[in-house]
Image (cartoon, helix red, strand yellow):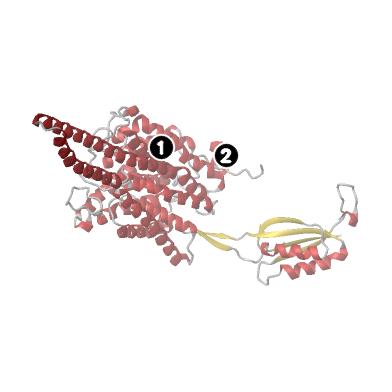
Amino acid sequence: MKRAVLCCWFAIGVLMLALPLSAQQAPAASSPASANAASHAEVSTEVSDKLAQLDQRVTAAQAAGDNAWMLTSAALVLMMTGPGLALFYGGLVRRKNTLAIMMQSFAMMGLISLLWALVGYSLAFGGDGPIIGNFSHAFLRGVGMDPNVDYAGTIPHLTFMIYQMMFAVITPALITGATAERMKFSGTVLFMTLWFFVVYAPLAHMVWGKGGFLNAAGGRFPCLDFAGGTVVHISSGVSALVCALYMGKRIGFPRQPMPPHSLVLSFIGACLLWVGWFGFNAGSALAANGLAASAFVATHLGAAAAAIGWSVAEWFKNGKASALGAISGAVAGLVAITPAAGFVRPMPAMVIGLAAGVLSYFMVTRVKAVFGYDDALDAFGVHGAGGTIGALLTGVFAQQIVNPIFGPGHPVGGRDGHWAQVGNQLVGVLVAWGFALIGTIVILKITDLVTGFRANEEQETQGLDISQHGEEAYYLES
Amino acid sequence: MMKLEAIIQPSRFESVKDALREVGIEGMTVTEVRGHGRQKGHTEVYRGREYTVDLLPKIKLEMVLPDKLVNTVVDTILKTAKTGKIGDGKIFISRVEEAIRIRNEERGESAL
């Protein structure tokens, strides 16, 4: 974009130089005054035409750059669900449940994508209500190649829509980490459909939608959530905890050992998540600009610091730094930096990552053991806890020098002296917690009545791959 | 004829196999097995959850030998499979009634 602007200035400069030259040449060619005036008028219309053309070209160049980055980002975020999350979770379960957990992520890529296009997008980003959108963009009516100036003025509305779709896809998939190895497929499909409408769409509207009461730009409680700390991670993490408590433990937990069947798969998955997260966070700038670069850097440093935070905590506790610990820490850091990415400078990003790595380590190893719930793959310990600490620390570290979201000259977070922002963040966190908690309980009840939620004992013992999908992940005799 | 079963450390298997070939042993059956004797297992930790792994991977060699070779083979295995640490495994020897080669129905020691 900078280049486009430079080109533009250069062109204007050349025109300025050319103007007096043509003015001097004109009288030499013909002396009568009337002819002189006519040629002046001609030149000035020519210049303004040229300027208008240039203006158009600059806008088009910026639109092209932004659109290229945003389409790439959308694809990166999709990669986080499949294969990223599917591999990460797939490796953590026992062999007999590998395909089932992968399929739960993949099903979201199909199901939520369609729901989003049909009505979800409209409920999240249509209208300007405080709680939820409307049906103005149902069936993608009015979503075309022209930008939606309410959200992103330089990219096609379609690009914005598909980018936001990928967020809606991964969020419910995160919950499956808590219900792993015992949730029926039919129950998963119904639960996720309801959850998408009851929890995700309204929360996305409250925080990001025009008129939403938590929207940072003009909401009643302006909550800073750059890329989804509340909307994606607190909502899914808290719902995951509710699901784990409601469903109960896996048969044999915690007596029977249930070690991950392939940390290699998890490792690949976690690394893909890390890469995909650049689309998730830096893409949330909604343009290929300096803010995207700032968010990119913050994201990377947050993940790196959290990987180190978890590893060091583990090293102290067990005398060894494990691969699973390092990758879990990185994911926790990516979660925590998500709301902050577009508001904080690089050094605070490291602090946020480090805090998230250590906190998630204690959530997963200590808190879970104390309360005894079976959050099988630690969806709550990583996303719920990481999302919460990230959202609160965003209020502490947000700076107007990075993102003057409250207008030029207005302080943003605690670092700018605006400590009230931590209060706003707390409101956002509490609303997200409450909403996810109540919504999930209601949906669980409904799901339980309609399809049932948990696989029966025989199916669970046999493994969900065979009992739910009729296939095996590893058919080693063939 | 004697049957010899040796359970050894997987890390010693290649040396044992090479040494046995040098003393003229031509056939053996090898299985990857898991088990433990007096050796204790080890502990693995996944996200703070500890698992004690007490069944450890071992290699089981099975050979049926003419009586005159048994001592040589036992000596060879003892020499090459020993690390001196707990968990080195065991050798079991038992008498075999009959051996039959399926291809040509040969019987006795000539079938080995």
* Residue position for label 2: A466
For residue A39, above or below residue B94: above
The residue under the point 24% across, 39% down is A212
Q: Position of residue A119 (x, y in %)?
A: 34, 30
The residue under the point 37% across, 40% down is A68
Please name the amino acid that badge 2 sits on: Ile
Q: Quadrant of residue A47?
A: top left
Please name the amino acid that badge 1 sits on: Met
Q: Quadrant of residue B110?
A: bottom right
Q: Are marks 2 and 1 on the same chain?
A: yes
Q: Nearer the viewer, residue A133 or A154?
A: A154
Whether residues under marks 2 and 1 lie with C-beta atoms below 8 angstroms apart, the answer is no
Pointer 2 chain: A
In this rendering, the count of numbered labels is 2
Q: Identify the mark nearer the N-term, 2 or 1.
A: 1
Residue B112 left/right relative to A125: right
Secondary structure at badge 2 equals helix
Q: Position of residue A127 (x, y in %)?
A: 25, 32
Q: CA distance from mark 2 to mark 1?
A: 22 Å
Q: Nearer the viewer, residue A471 or A271?
A: A271
* Residue position for label 1: A192
Q: Quadrant of residue A393?
A: bottom left
For residue A208, above or below residue A115: below
Residue B55 left/right relative to A396: right
Residue A120 left/right relative to B46: left
Crowd class of label 1 (few under 14; some 14 to 19; many from 20; radius 10 Å) = many
Quadrant where the N terminus of chain A sits is: top left
Quadrant where the C terminus of chain A sits is: top right
Secondary structure at badge 1 equals helix
Is residue B77 visible to the viewer in this orientation of the structure? yes
Is residue A440 visible to the viewer in this orientation of the structure? no
